[in-house]
Image (spheres, rainbow, N blue to C red):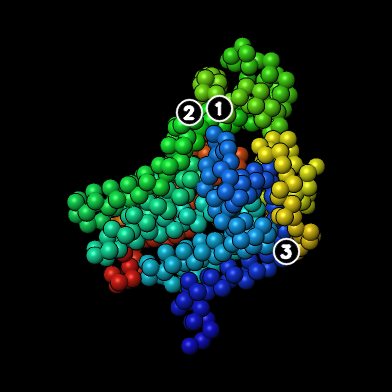
């Protein structure tokens, strides 16, 4: 068998080897980036590794810190942390290739799996102490389970495992909640109505049991659900886009708003100063006032809000039409700043003890891959591949919805996550990163399978 035939016949292995080689290079070219949020995650994880339960703020969930605590219990090492996150990236790429291979198209599996394996955004954030990589792997694994129709004799394992996976993803990033109903219905969508109901019940119960301890903990401190302070994010989204005015502001907020944000509404330090001054993270009454203020501003300028939401939608697909904020440029700049030295941190960290994370310091200079990322980040349509996957996946899933409803349900779930962040006018495309690899799978899985071997191809 020729090398080419060997590679194309085994797309999952080939994708894994490619992903491994790229990441082996990145491990020595890209130092660990510890952002402000990352410093908090690391500090809480060290508490957990020491057997101390930290006080999480209302807008955080414990999933990523628990994950880090498992790593730190072995060693507080930047190489170990990056290595584990790179393994998650390899797993994600292999899942994409496996999911497409099951449709009977090994060459498509190799091509798209390889694109995911070398995706600069996915690779870059595997070197950052942030929760996106872990969430992406959990969501991708959940999507593969939802697409797969298990043999009837094993019909109870798949929905339970799916429920646990998406429940864990919600504990890492609570925004994943919006995809849950689509995943559960897609996974249950096969067989008789009785089997549908049983599988849906099992997966729902698994999710509830997974997140219940955290929700009970939150309820005891006055927070409903996985996290709180959602109105604060909408309020800041409007401020960031210049749509917030003090015309509708409650009297007690006017002076503080003018002092902190009137000159530069997008100033993150001004935002944190305002929020902390009014205890907006925890005070439910303040959150209700901010929500009423935000909705009044939206009603005054609905078309401007719609335009900003549309732009945010493209941002969530990693596509920046025109001269817009680009996270990859921020990423490379932050690497150059080290971000582990105390002077390079902003004042908005929740932890005041940065000395604890000195063990995550990387002394080597960024290498060639950092230069390549810097050049790539200057491309205004850097996310054209992601946007293309989204567009093609939407078309093929819609055309095949009658005979293959599962891919369409998953596409709607991916869209729900993207739209949720667009509605809040989020400028950070990484928030939708968890569904990007799944969109790549749906590009092919929405098409009728190329073969009908039920041992390899599910009926969706």
Q: Which mark is residue 282?
A: 1
Q: Is 52 drawn above or below residue 451 in the view shown?
A: above
Residue in the image at 40% along x and 52% along y = 164
From this viewpoint, is residue 418 visible? Answer: no
Residue at x 53%, y 84% (from the top left corner): 3
- Which residue is found at the position 75% from the left and 58% from the top? 362
Viewer-closest of 275 and 456: 275
Q: Is residue 133 left or right of residue 242?
A: left
Give the percent coordinates (x, y) of residue 147.
Answer: 36, 58
Judged from the image, the secondary structure of the residue bearing numbered disc 2 is loop
Residue position for label 2: 222
From the viewer's perspective, is the residue at label 2 or at label 3 nearer? 2
Q: In the image as oriented, which residue stretches furthest toward the front?
A: 51
Q: Is residue 459 left or right of residue 410?
A: left
Q: If you read the primary sequence from the N terminus, does the residue marked by circle 2 or circle 1 appear first?
A: 2
Residue 407 image point, x, y percent: 37, 54
């Amino acid at each position: 068998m020729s090398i080419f035939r060997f590679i194309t016949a085994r797309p999952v292995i080939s994708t894994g080897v490619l992903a491994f080689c790229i990441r082996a290079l990145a491990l020595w070219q890209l130092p660990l980036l510890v952002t402000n949020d990352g410093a908090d995650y690391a500090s809480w994880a060290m508490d957990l590794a020491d057997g101390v339960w930290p006080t999480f703020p209302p807008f955080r969930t414990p999933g990523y810190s628990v994950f880090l605590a498992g790593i730190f219990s072995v060693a507080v090492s930047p190489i170990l942390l990056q290595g584990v996150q790179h393994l998650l990236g390899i797993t994600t790429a292999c899942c994409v290739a496996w999911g497409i291979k099951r449709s009977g198209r090994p060459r498509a599996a190799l091509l798209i799996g390889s694109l995911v394996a070398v995706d600069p955004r996915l690779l870059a954030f595997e070197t950052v102490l942030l929760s996106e990589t872990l969430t992406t792997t959990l969501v991708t694994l959940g999507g593969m389970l939802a697409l797969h129709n298990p043999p009837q004799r094993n019909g109870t394992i798949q929905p339970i495992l799916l429920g646990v996976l998406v429940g864990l993803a919600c504990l890492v990033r609570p925004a994943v909640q919006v995809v849950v109903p689509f995943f559960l219905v897609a996974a249950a969508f096969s067989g008789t109505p009785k089997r549908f109901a049983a599988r849906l019940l099992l997966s729902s119960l698994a999710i509830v049991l997974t997140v219940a301890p955290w929700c009970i903990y939150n309820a005891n401190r006055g927070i409903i659900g996985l996290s709180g302070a959602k109105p604060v994010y909408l309020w800041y989204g409007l401020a960031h886009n210049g749509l917030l005015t003090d015309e509708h502001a409650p009297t007690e907020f006017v002076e503080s708003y003018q002092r902190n944000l009137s000159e530069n509404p997008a100033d993150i330090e001004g935002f944190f100063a305002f929020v902390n001054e009014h205890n907006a993270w925890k005070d439910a009454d303040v959150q209700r006032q901010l929500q009423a203020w935000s909705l009044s501003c939206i009603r005054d300028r609905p078309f401007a809000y719609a335009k900003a939401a549309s732009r945010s939608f493209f941002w969530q697909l990693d596509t920046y039409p025109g001269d817009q904020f680009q996270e990859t440029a921020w990423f490379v700049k932050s690497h150059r700043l080290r971000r582990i030295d105390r002077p390079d941190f902003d004042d908005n960290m929740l932890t005041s003890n940065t000395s604890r994370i000195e063990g995550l310091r990387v002394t080597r200079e960024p290498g060639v891959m950092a230069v390549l990322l810097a050049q790539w980040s200057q491309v205004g349509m850097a996310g054209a591949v992601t946007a293309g996957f989204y567009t093609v996946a939407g078309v093929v899933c819609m055309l095949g919805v009658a005979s293959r409803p599962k891919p369409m349900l998953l596409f709607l779930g991916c869209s729900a996550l993207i739209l949720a962040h667009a509605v809040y006018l989020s400028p950070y495309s990484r928030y939708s990163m968890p569904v990007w690899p799944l969109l790549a799978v749906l590009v092919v899985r929405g098409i009728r399978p190329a073969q009908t071997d039920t041992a390899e191809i599910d009926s969706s």
